[in-house]
Image (cartoon, grey):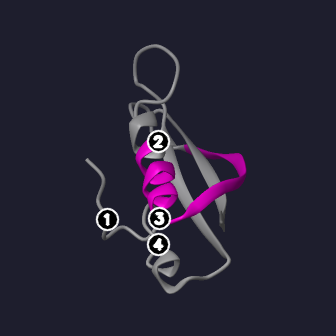
Amino acid sequence: MIDYNDSSTYSTASGRNLHYVVLQVTLKEKFMGTGSGNLTELEAVINDQAAKGYRLHTITTSNGGSKGMLGGDRIQATMVFERL
């Protein structure tokens, strides 16, 4: 479930009719297997901005490191949305 109070996943800026909004989502790798365990969160953020009249302009990723032995890797996805 998305925590819309978390500034890394929700922007109130897009409610102010800015031309661009930048958001960052932390993707957590699954403990067992490969891939991200929270791609639905990333999808929800993109769809939420689309509903506000923005389109995904650019997305970049960077390795955020590990949260310890059982935590798995973290990948920071930084997205730039452009108002249509």
**Residue at horizontal 51 percent and vertical 50 percent from the top:** 46
Specify whether residue 57 is painted magenta.
yes
Name which residue type carries label 3: Ser
Residue linked to disc 3: 8
For marks 4 and 1 on the same chain, the one whose residue lies earlier in the sequence = 1
Whether the residues at callouts 3 and 1 have beta carbons within 8 Å, the answer is no
Q: What span is colored magenta in the figure?
A: 43-65
Task: Please rate how many residues cluster around mark 1, counting C-alpha atoms within 10 Å: few if below 14, some from 14 to 19, many from 20.
Answer: few
Regarding mark 3 in the picture, which secondary structure is present there?
loop
Of mark 2 and mark 3, the one earlier in the sequence is: 3
Give the Cα separation between the discs numbered 3 and 4. Answer: 8 Å
User: Which of the two discs, 2 and 3, sits closer to the camera?
Assistant: 2
Residue hosting label 2:
43
Image coordinates for residue 66, horizontal then vertical, percent: 53, 41
Q: Nearer the viewer, mark 3 or mark 1?
A: 1
Label 1 – label 2 distance at C-alpha: 14 Å
What numbered label is drawn on residue 4?
1
Quadrant of the rendered structure where residue 19 is?
A: bottom right
Question: Nearer the observer, disc 3 or disc 4?
Answer: 4
Q: What residue type is labelled 2?
A: Glu
The disc labelled 1 sits on which kind of residue?
Answer: Tyr
Q: In this view, does 20 lie to the left or right of 69?
A: right
User: Dot 4 corresponds to which residue?
Assistant: 11
Confirm or deny contact between disc 2 and disc 3 (CB under 8 A): no
Q: Is residue 19 above or below residue 56?
A: below
